[in-house]
Structures are given as C-alpha cells and as structure tokens.
Image (cartoon, rainbow, N blue to C red):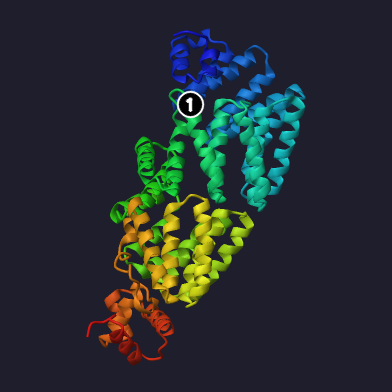
C-alpha cells in the first residue's frame, strides 16, 4: 500500500486507511492519524471502534496542549454519537468540549461550534431561536475562515426556516450548504450528513426536482468513497424513490431491496424508511400481502405507515377500514408536511367511500399547502385531487380542466405513473361530456403506460372500464345499483359489500345525482335500460 494516511484520505480510500493505521499500535499514532482512522472506521460502519479512535484523538490533542483541536474532536465525537442515537454520552462530550474552550478563554471557532447541537435540539419546539443560534455560527465561521462549520450551520438554518414556514429561504439555505459540499469545503462525514439531510428535506417539502438532482450527486459521491456504508444505505432508499417517480420501477425495486437487505438486523432508523419504500412498490405492483408485511415492519421500528397502509386497505377492497384509518391519520397529522402526505390519500379514500363533501374539504386544504410550500409537485397532487372530486360532484367540464392542469405539471416533473392516473381522470371526464371519441384513446394510453410500469393494482378493473361505465358511475357505484336492482335494502347491501349503511346511503345519493333520478325504482329502471344489470 502506497501513500500516507492523508493522501489515502484525499482519494477516499477508507478501507486502505483502516488497513494501514489499524495495523499499527495506537500509541504510535499522532492525533491527526487517530482522527483519520476514526473517520475511516465511521465511514465503513465500525461504530464502536470509530468512537474509540476519536476519543484517542481527543486525548492526544490534550496531551500535546492543543486545546482547540481537543475541543473540536470532542465536538465531532458528540455529533457522531448523536447521529447514532446515543444522546446521553453525546451531551457529555459536548459539555466537555465547551468547558475546555471556556476554561482556556479562547476566542475561536470552536467556541461557536457547540451552538450547533444546541440549535438542533431546539428545532422542533423553538425553530426561531434555533435559527438565531445558527446564524451566529455562520458569522463566526466567516470571521475564523471555517467553511465546513458554515455549511453545517446553513443546513440547520434550512431546517429551521422550513419549520417556521419560510420554505423559499429554507431551500436557499440548503442550496448554499450543498454548494459548499460540491466545492470541496467539507470533510467526508459533514458532506454525507448534508447530502442525505438536504435530500430528505427536499422530499418532505415536495421539491422533486432538487431531490432528483441531489440524489444523482450523492450517488456519484458515494461511488468515490471506498467501502462507504452509512450514507450508501440512505442513498439506496433515495435512489429507489426517485426511480419510482421517474418511472424506472425495476431500478426502484432493486434499490429498495438492497436497502432492506443491507439494513436487516441493524439498529438503524433507516430500516423503517427502507421497509416503507418497498411496501409502496409492492402495493403498486399488486403484491398486497407482502406490502402489508413491509408496512407493518416499518411501523414496528417507528416509521409512519400512512398513508400507504390506508391505500393498501382501499386497494384490497376494505373501503370502510381504509376510511376510518385515513380519517384518524388526518386528525393525528399536525405538521404541514405530515398533513400534505395524508390529504391526497384522504381524498381518494373518502371518494371511494361516497363522501365527496369531506374530500372537497381536503382538496381545499391541500391547495393551500401547495401554495405555502410553493411546490410544483404538491400543486400537481392538488389539481389531480380536485379533478377527482369535481367528477364526483358531477362537474365534468371543470374536472377536465383540473386534470389537464395536473397532467401538464406531472409531465413537466417527468412522473409517468401520476401522468397515467391523471389521463384516466381525463378519460372519465370526457365520457361524462359525451366525448367517447376522446375518452377511449385517452384511457387506452393510460392503460399502456400503467402496463409498462407494472402498476398491477391500478390496472385491476381499469381494462374492464375501457369503454366507461354508463352515467359515469364508479365501479363501487355499479355494484351498489346492481344490488338495488335486485331489490336489496341498504342494510342488505351493506352486508353484501361489507360496508356501513351510512356509506351505502352516500353511494345512492351520488348515483341518483349522476343518473338524474329520485327513487330506487327509477334507478332500477335506469340500470336495466343502460345495461348495468342484465335483463
């Protein structure tokens, strides 16, 4: 093996650094080498050994009388332990490092560094106060020439601004932090933390374009780091999510499986994210039992299983259970990001359960959130949901306009699955308007797109509706009117379809409105006349 530990680090050869320095006696290493060894061990996921090596670096700096470097190594050890979920020992190292600087009465960057973990701990409840602390770190980093600390502080500022509700300035802070990473101003651990953190927050604020671009950059960075593990796992999940939206479901499936396989049995919070992502793909592919298992695994390790699990219940025909679960999820989602993720599913499920009034209320809230986040992706979701509700409200012309807006946005975002689903809505609206000549090819194109993706769950029943149901009735409404024509009461229909009588009544109200009748007998006659029920 050629080269010093530092030259190997410059090339990202972390396994080779471990082989070089790990073969030497700890007492023969200087503090800089202990630090490099700690970084190599952390990046190859040997957590306990990494913490011990950083502690040796800290002790080494104290022995040679370098107070600033001793404080900095204590800070890094605290940040590393915090990232691993070891809060108590992390706080101990932060306190030790801050005390060292205080006792030495030093005017240095290290004095301000300890404001970062303090600010991070305040993000949830006191984001405004956290933002001021992080701005102080940025000012200090400018005075002392420390671009890495400035980048970390700006990443924290982005989080605080998003929590406050200033998404525009939050994204600007994220971009500036990422610019420092791309410029090579940050070390490998800081780079990985900022890469993954920024991508995660871009997902949360529905900034698909940035999430896609930064995921590609993270992939390239990971490939340059020999033996890299921690950020590679998160990269698997992010690549899967981006590939799914981009229509490359084969890659999405491969990356999601890789994340689940590599993280299995590890005490890592990413495992919940990995299970949820795989569950989403399984649901869309029609693998309902396997999807249910992965959603439950995600929930067991503390990751939210909604709204995916509620959509799985809907796809499995458990409409009433899905309706109850999504209403509970909406009530429990207090933060705007959480609510935005739940609302689209809420609209789909409440429409299926025959409650367009509740769905309309959710669309109004979703539209407001899209404006708040200034998100093209969320605007597309809101327009798509609006189109679905307008169809339920028997406003096909308005529904067609909303669906067209959604399709334009989804195409711009290069999201073929969502584009296909919107084309189904467009076809349904055209059917209601009597424009079968447009509806048929629109629906056929949507079916072709869904088939190419492997979206089995969406294709169930869609092929059978390729000519459109009379009166614009949904598949569930066709089932209800057919049972009405057989002479069943609301209670008997509820028992037959395993739904509540209240849901049956909502369906009947929607059916009467769509086909222009006012009684069960008139609805029965209409069903026979239009071939919904065989004579």
Residue at the front extreme?
437
Q: Image check: 61 left or right of 311?
A: right
Residue 480: quadrant of the picture:
bottom left
Q: Image check: 500 left or right of 6?
A: left
Quick one: 285 or 81, which is closer to the camera? Answer: 285
Residue to which mark 1 is pinned: 43
Please count the marks in the image.
Answer: 1
- Name the residue rendered at 64%, 20% in the picture: 70
Quick one: 252 or 527, which is closer to the camera? Answer: 527
Q: Is residue 324 visible?
A: no
Give residue 105's position: percent from left, percent from top.
77, 24
- Name the residue rendered at 70%, 48% in the picture: 128
Above or below, comparing residue 203 to residue 46 in the picture: below
* Circle 1 SS class: helix
Q: Is residue 432 visible?
A: yes
Q: Residues within 10 Å of mark 1 (few under 14, many from 20)?
A: many
Q: Image check: 533 left or right of 189?
A: left
Above or below, comparing residue 396 to residue 48 in the picture: below
Above or below, comparing residue 261 to residue 458 in the picture: above
């Amino acid at each position: 093996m050629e080269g010093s530990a530092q030259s190997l680090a410059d090339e990202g050869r972390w396994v080779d650094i471990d082989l070089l320095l790990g073969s030497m006696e700890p007492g023969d290493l200087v503090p800089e080498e202990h630090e490099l060894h700690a970084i190599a061990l952390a990046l190859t996921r040997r957590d306990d050994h990494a913490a011990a090596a950083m502690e040796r670096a800290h002790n080494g700096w104290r022995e040679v009388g370098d107070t600033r470097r001793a404080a900095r190594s204590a800070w890094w050890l605290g940040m590393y332990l915090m990232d691993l979920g070891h809060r108590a020992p992390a706080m101990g190292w932060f306190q030790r490092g801050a005390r060292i600087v205080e006792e030495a009465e030093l005017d240095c960057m290290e004095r301000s560094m300890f404001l970062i973990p303090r600010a991070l701990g305040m993000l949830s409840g006191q984001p405004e106060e956290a933002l001021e602390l992080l701005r102080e770190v940025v000012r200090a980093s400018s005075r002392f020439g420390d671009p890495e600390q400035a980048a970390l502080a700006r990443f924290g500022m982005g989080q605080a601004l998003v929590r406050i509700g200033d998404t525009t300035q939050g994204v600007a802070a994220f971009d500036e932090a990422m610019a420092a990473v791309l410029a090579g101003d940050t070390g490998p651990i800081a780079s990985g933390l900022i890469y993954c953190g920024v991508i995660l927050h871009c997902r949360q604020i529905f900034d698909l374009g940035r999430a896609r671009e930064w995921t590609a950059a993270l992939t390239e960075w990971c490939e340059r780091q020999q033996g890299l593990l921690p950020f590679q796992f998160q990269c698997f999940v992010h690549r899967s999510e981006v590939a799914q939206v981009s229509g490359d479901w084969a890659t999405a499936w491969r990356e999601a499986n890789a994340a689940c396989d590599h993280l299995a049995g590890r005490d890592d919070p990413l495992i919940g994210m990995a299970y949820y992502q795989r569950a989403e793909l399984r649901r869309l592919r029609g693998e309902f039992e396997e999807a249910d298992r992965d959603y439950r695994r995600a929930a067991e390790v503390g990751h939210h299983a909604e709204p995916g699990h509620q959509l799985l219940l809907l796809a499995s025909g458990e409409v009433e259970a899905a309706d109850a679960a999504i209403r509970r999820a909406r009530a429990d989602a207090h933060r705007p990001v959480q609510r935005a993720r739940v609302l689209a599913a809420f609209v789909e499920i409440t429409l299926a359960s025959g409650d367009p009034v509740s769905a309309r209320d959710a669309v109004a809230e979703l539209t407001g959130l899209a404006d708040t986040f200034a998100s093209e992706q969320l605007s597309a979701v809101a327009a798509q949901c609006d189109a679905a509700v307008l169809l339920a409200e028997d406003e096909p012309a308005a529904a067609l306009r909303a669906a067209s807006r959604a399709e334009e946005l989804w195409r711009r975002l290069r999201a073929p699955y969502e584009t296909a689903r919107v084309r189904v809505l467009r076809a349904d609206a055209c059917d209601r308007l009597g424009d079968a000549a447009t509806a048929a090819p629109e629906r056929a194109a949507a079916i072709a797109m869904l088939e190419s993706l492997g979206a089995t769950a969406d294709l169930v029943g869609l092929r059978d509706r390729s000519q459109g149901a009379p009166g614009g009735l949904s598949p569930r409404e066709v089932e209800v009117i057919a049972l009405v024509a057989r002479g069943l009461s609301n209670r008997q229909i509820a028992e037959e379809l395993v739904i509540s009588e209240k849901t049956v009544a909502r369906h009947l109200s929607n059916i009467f409105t769509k086909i222009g009748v006012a009684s069960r007998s008139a609805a029965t006659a209409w069903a026979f006349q239009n071939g919904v029920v065989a004579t």
